[in-house]
Image: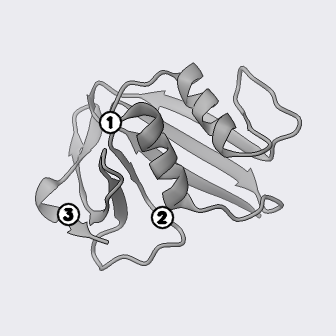
């Protein structure tokens, strides 16, 4: 069985900096298309956008990975880059119809919705509910 987590990052942090950030969070680090890491069960895909959240990290892993705290990872990214982050959690229950967690620069977490943009997505500010 495999798992995934899609994390949207407001700042344009760049793939190398994001890889470093994930490598400091996960003990065995992560692999990418360009950087193989035989010690890692995590694989990171990087995407960039021109509007809203300017980059996205799509993290995949196989079932042998230990569970990790998605909110702690989001807060690690926030503190590493002083930026907002949004993700669709797999282990945090949210009020329907909200499906995303938005973490602001102060580390506060909110249930949130998003708005589609021409080339990206952004948080829908009026949807925020403090968790």
Viewport quadrant of the C terminus:
bottom left
Relative placement, left or right, of 113 versus 66 is left
SS state under label 1? loop
Q: Residue furthest left?
A: 126
For label 1, the residue is 10
Asked whether disc 3 touches disc 1, contact meaning CB atoms under 8 Å apart, the reply is no
For label 2, the residue is 89
Viewport quadrant of the N terminus:
bottom right
Q: Residue at x 48, y 41 (%)?
A: 77
Q: Position of residue 59 (x, y in %)?
A: 61, 45
Relative placement, left or right, of 44 versus 103 is right
Q: Position of residue 123 (x, y in %)?
A: 23, 50
SS state under label 2? loop
- Indicate which disc, 3 or 2, sits on the residue closer to the N terminus: 2
Position of residue 122 relative to residue 127, above or below, is above
Residue 128's disc number: 3
């Amino acid at each position: 069985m495999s798992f995934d987590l899609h994390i949207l990052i407001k700042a344009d942090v760049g793939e190398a900096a994001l890889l470093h950030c994930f490598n400091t969070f996960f003990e065995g680090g992560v692999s990418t298309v360009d950087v193989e890491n035989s010690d890692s069960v995590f694989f990171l895909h990087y995407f960039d956008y021109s509007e809203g959240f300017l980059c996205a990290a799509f993290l995949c892993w196989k079932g042998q990975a230990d569970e990790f705290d998605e909110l702690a990872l989001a807060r690690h990214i926030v503190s590493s880059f002083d930026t907002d982050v949004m993700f669709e959690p797999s282990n945090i229950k949210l009020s329907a119809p909200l499906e995303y967690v938005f973490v602001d620069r102060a580390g506060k977490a909110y249930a949130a919705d998003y708005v589609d943009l021409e080339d990206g997505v952004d948080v829908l500010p009026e949807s925020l509910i403090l968790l």
